[in-house]
Image (tube, rainbow, N blue to C red):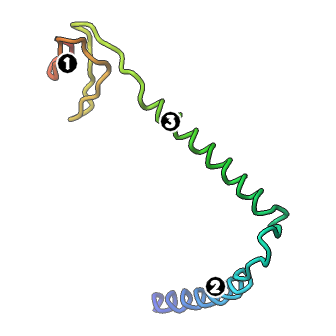
Amino acid sequence: MESVRAVVYLSVCLSVLTSLCQGQRSADSQLPSAPDESILGLTTNELAEALQGLLDEADSRVALSVEKKASVIPRCDVGERCAMKHGPRIGRLCDCLRGTACNTFFLRCY
């Protein structure tokens, strides 16, 4: 009984929402007659410049985050601890020098 009531309530809410959105869509579908007409007090050229500025800022932020992720892993000397064990996973602390490797049992460079 409650599920039927919930379905009826949901369908009524959706139909009211749909009818309200139809009215807004018909009012919003009218395009400005001239390209230089202002929208919210700004011309289309000003809006395009503002959008380009936002996109440039977003590109610079993405480049910074990539640079941070590409950081250099420090080097370990022979006998130093090079990894930590987290359950079944092994996390690297540093990179062993050339000619040595991180022993996964002792977790040290040998």
Residue 28, percent from left and from top = 72, 80
Q: Amino acid at mark 2?
A: Leu
**Label for residue 72?**
none
Q: Nearer the viewer, residue 2 or 93?
A: 93
Residue 74, percent from left and from top = 36, 16
Q: Amino acid at mark 3?
A: Ser
The quarter of the picture where the C terminus appears is top left
**Label for residue 17?**
2
Q: Residue furthest right?
A: 41
Look at the picture and state if 45 lies above or below 57: below
Look at the picture and state if 107 lies above or below 1: above
Answer whether labels 3 and 2 touch (C-beta < 8 Å): no
Residue at screen point 18% across, 12% down: 100
**Label for residue 102?**
1
Task: Characterize the local packing of mark 2: few (<14), some (14-19) or many (20 or more) Cα atoms within 10 angstroms.
Answer: few
Task: Characterize the local packing of mark 1: few (<14), some (14-19) or many (20 or more) Cα atoms within 10 angstroms.
Answer: many
Query: How far is the residue under mark 3 from the one under mark 2?
Result: 41 Å
Which element type, helix, strand or loop, lies under badge 1? strand
Residue at screen point 46% across, 35% down: 66
The quarter of the picture where the N terminus appears is bottom left
In the rendered structure, which disc, 1 or 3, sits on the residue that comes first in sequence?
A: 3
Query: How far is the residue under mark 1 from the one under mark 3?
Result: 29 Å
Q: Nearer the viewer, mark 1 or mark 3?
A: 3
The image shows a total of numbered marks equal to: 3
Q: Quick check: 28 left or right of 103? A: right
Q: Residue under label 3, please give it.
A: 65
In the rendered structure, which disc, 2 or 1, sits on the residue that comes first in sequence?
A: 2
Q: Amino acid at mark 1?
A: Cys
Which element type, helix, strand or loop, lies under badge 2? helix
Residue 30, percent from left and from top = 73, 82
Q: Nearer the viewer, residue 56 or 80?
A: 56
Query: How far is the residue under mark 2 from the one under mark 1?
Result: 62 Å
